Amino acid sequence: VLPGDGIGPSVVKSAIDVLDILVDGLEIVYSEIGFSAYESTGQHLPYETLDLTGECRNILSGPVHNTSDRRSPLDTLKLQLDLYAVMRRFKTLSPDMGSPEMDVTLWASNATLGQDIIETRDMEGITINKYIRSSSYSRMMGKALSEMESRDKRRVVCAVRSDLLPESSQLFRDSFESLFVNSVYDTDVMNIDRWASSVVRNPHLTEFLICADLYSHVAAGLLAGMTGGNHLSPIAYVGDTNNLYIPGHMESFNDVPKDYLNPTSAIMAVSQAIFDMGYRKEADDVVNALVETYSAGHKTPELGGDLTTEEFTRRVISNL
């Protein structure tokens, strides 16, 4: 567990409070990252943290403050652990917060700025180069397929942009069709704009979305808007041996008093982490407890409620 900076320790504490009553005998190891680590060690990503994250398969981290003159320590950690895939689950936790009963999981490759994508400025403008490895597609889709089977899902959409990027779209499609056999799964290959318009009209048609990283952020923004907001959905960075779970984007908390932060995405991150560890019933129990909490009208201020972070967490725990 890496509490991180700013709001990180507060929302991570809520997630650990939930975790503590779910799974007996689970060893939790703490370390530092970000400015809090720099203040005590002189490093934003201490060697001790790197050693511990190499030993621990599952890592929960709060957000860290980025600096303009250096790579984020979380980005460095993703590189060190070879976290090549990104997974986000978007679920409507209450009918008044989005499209009712919507539950979509998004998978994409984790593009590395400066390595996979390079911007070069000259006198005339900017040239953007993107390098695509076919292995990054196949590895990511293999993880997505395993997740689908674990959750007993069958409907999956592959989103491409064949009108603009025909070669890379075909490579993406070939990787998809080699793994997701249409005789076994309910598959569809769609241009991203067509998928976006169809999911708005019928949110229940998509269970899993496999999306190229060039427009996965746009797809994630659309899905977040349909399920209550970006700050409710955690982000999982996935590799062969390690997984890193981070609460969703926190910009909406800029004006929220510290004691009133919404810990939902951190709690959802714990749910995903224990699901990946094999505690599938307990993981579902967490999500069901959140649904029960929101359905009863118990919310933090940014969603129209008046609960503090601690009060909201206690409501979730009582529903467990």
Image: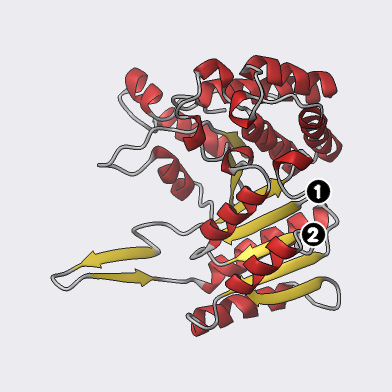
Residue drawn at the location 79% of the way across and 64% of the way down: 205
Residue drawn at the location 51% of the way across and 26% of the way down: 8
Q: Is residue 262 left or right of residue 122?
A: right
Query: In front here: 243 or 53?
Result: 243
**Which residue is denoted by mark 1 in the rendering?**
101
Q: Mark 1 falls on what kind of element?
A: loop
Query: In front here: 275 or 30?
Result: 275
Q: Is residue 240 visible?
A: no
> CB under 8 Å between callouts 2 and 1?
yes
Q: Is residue 212 left or right of residue 119?
A: right
Identify the amino acid type marked 2.
His
Image: 27 above or below 152: above
Q: Which mark is residue 110?
A: none
Q: Position of residue 235 (x, y in %)?
A: 59, 44
Image: 261 above or below 45: above
Q: Is residue 65 visible?
A: yes
Quarter-wise, where is residue 318 in the image? top right
**Few, some or many C-alpha atoms within 10 Å of disc 2 (few <14, some 14-19, many ≥20)?**
some
Query: In front here: 48 or 33?
Result: 33
Query: In front here: 242 or 132?
Result: 132
Q: CA distance from mark 2 to mark 1?
A: 8 Å
Quadrant location, the N terminus: top right
**Which residue is denoted by mark 2 in the rendering?**
204
Residue drawn at the location 64% of the way across and 22% of the way down: 14
Identify the amino acid type marked 1.
Glu
Q: Earlier in the sequence, mark 2 or mark 1?
A: 1
Residue drawn at the location 65% of the way across and 57% of the way down: 106
Quarter-wise, where is residue 230 in the image? top right
**Few, some or many C-alpha atoms within 10 Å of disc 1 (few <14, some 14-19, many ≥20)?**
some
Q: Position of residue 267 (x, y in %)?
A: 68, 31
Q: Is residue 295 left or right of residue 169?
A: right
